[in-house]
Each structure stands twice: as C-alpha cells, then as structure tokens.
Amino acid sequence: QQQVKQSPQSLIVQKGGISIINCAYENTAFDYFPWYQQFPGKGPALLIAIRPDVSEKKEGRFTISFNKSAKQFSLHIMDSQPGDSATYFCAAKYETSGSRLTFGEGTQLTVNP
Amino acid sequence: GAVVSQHPSRVICKSGTSVKIECRSLDFQATTMFWYRQFPKQSLMLMATSNEGSKATYEQGVEKDKFLINHASLTLSTLTVTSAHPEDSSFYICSAGTGRGEKLFFGSGTQLSVL
C-alpha cells in the first residue's frame, strides 16, 4: 500500500492560533487529497479536499496548501478553537482504486482555551 | 452530505461468540463499501472492500473466515466477527462511496469489546 506520511503526531495550539499539519506522499498517481476530522468514539468526517490541479483551497477557517512538485500538502486551521480539538487524518487516492483511500498516521490536535 | 449509519455503536460480548455490525447508506446507493479497523491513537487500517453482489476483497493479513462481509444490497453491508476473542477488540468503521465521485462517507463506528 502506498504511504502517506503525516506530521506532527500531536500538536498543541492556543485559542486563536494557526494549526498546521503536513503530509507527504509517494505515488504521483494520487489525484485526490482529502482531510478528515475525527472526534473520540466517532467515525472520520470529511473536512476539506483538493485535487492536484490547484495549489490552494479554502473553506472557512480551513485551508489546504498543495505542492505538487514536492509531493506535499498541508492543512491550515486559522483562528483555532477548542472545538477543533480532534484527530486529523490526511489521505490520498488515485482513480484506479475507486474510492479507496490511503490514510496518514493522524495528528492529535489540542487547542487550549 | 450523505449519511452512513452504523450499528451498533458499542457492543460487549463474551469470547467465542459472533458479532454482527451493520452499515447502511441512508440517502444514496453505495456500490462500494469499505471496512476499517482502528486501534487507540492509530490510523485507520483497511480490512476489506466490498462491492454489491460480489465477494469482498480482503487486505493482506485479514482472515476472511474470521471477518465475514456481506454486501447484499446497494444500501447495506454487514461485518460479522466470528468466534470473537479479546484480541478482536477494536473500533470498527465502515465507509461507503457511490463509485462515481471521490467522496467517501464514514459511519460513526462500532466499539467492540470482547471479554
């Protein structure tokens, strides 16, 4: 299974700060890169996603930055709130795998009030 | 967004018994469903992929006779953990896709505890 490497493993941010989570992938055939948010005891929920033909996508306080040449993408959470405290997973897929996703290892984000 | 309903959310059973977990797509037809297993503070591990009307495809190292998957309709897939043992205790999550787009929708997960 192709890997997606995610960092950091954990992150602590003060309320109002910017949370940044990074991912790197190996397979250049990946063509869809979603981010999922997971609260304890719940399934992951799609947060935001990007395709490699754009370098940035913003939805509210969440922004994905994508660097195709470096095979890296990152999630930025602006004005981080305590309610954003959760585990975040990056993922990637390529067309021939249908909807099958390859997940990163996850980042546990804690936003202190 | 599309809704995937997973039941039960939590189950406790005795060692040796079988447990069935249901995954339903409520407002769309799921041509493909995926079953994941997640240990505490770890990522999701794909167990198997099921397509409606056909046999599931299991990932390497996943015992197909242990984890029985049935995808009998476009809105329902079930995972049966047969003869469960304490090492099968985990968080099981299903997800469903329409097959046409990229979006994958997840169930709320099932926490299985085998005593």
Image (cartoon, rainbow, N blue to C red):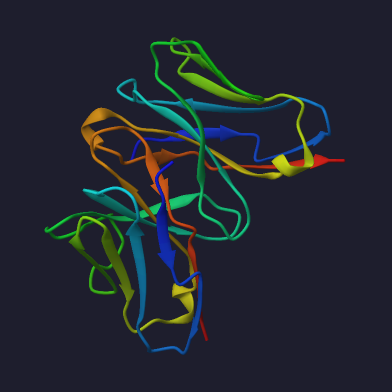
Q: Residue furthest front?
A: B27
Which x, y percent locates residue B114? Answer: 49, 82
Between residue A82 and residue A13, name the one nearer to us: A82
Residue B111: % across, % down: 52, 69
Q: Position of residue B115 (x, y in %)?
A: 52, 86
Quarter holding the C terminus of chain A is: top right
**Does B91 sit above or below residue B65?**
above
**What residue sits 82% from the left and 28% below the top?**
A16
Residue B48 position by quadrant: bottom left
Q: Residue at x 39, y 39 (%)?
A: A102
Farthest-out residue, right:
A113
Residue drawn at x 62%, y 51% is A39
Query: Is A66 left or right of B28, judged from the image as shown?
Result: right
Q: Nearer the viewer, residue B17 or B8?
A: B8
Percent from the top left, x then y, of residue A15? 84, 33
Q: Quadrant of the N terminus of chain A?
A: top left
- How many numbered discs, if any? 0
Check the image and report above or below for A113 versus B76.
above
Return the residue nearer the eye: A55 or A5: A55
Q: Is residue B65 left or right of residue B45?
A: left
Residue B92 picture quarter: bottom left
Above/below status of B104 relative to B47: above
Q: Quadrant of residue B24?
A: bottom left
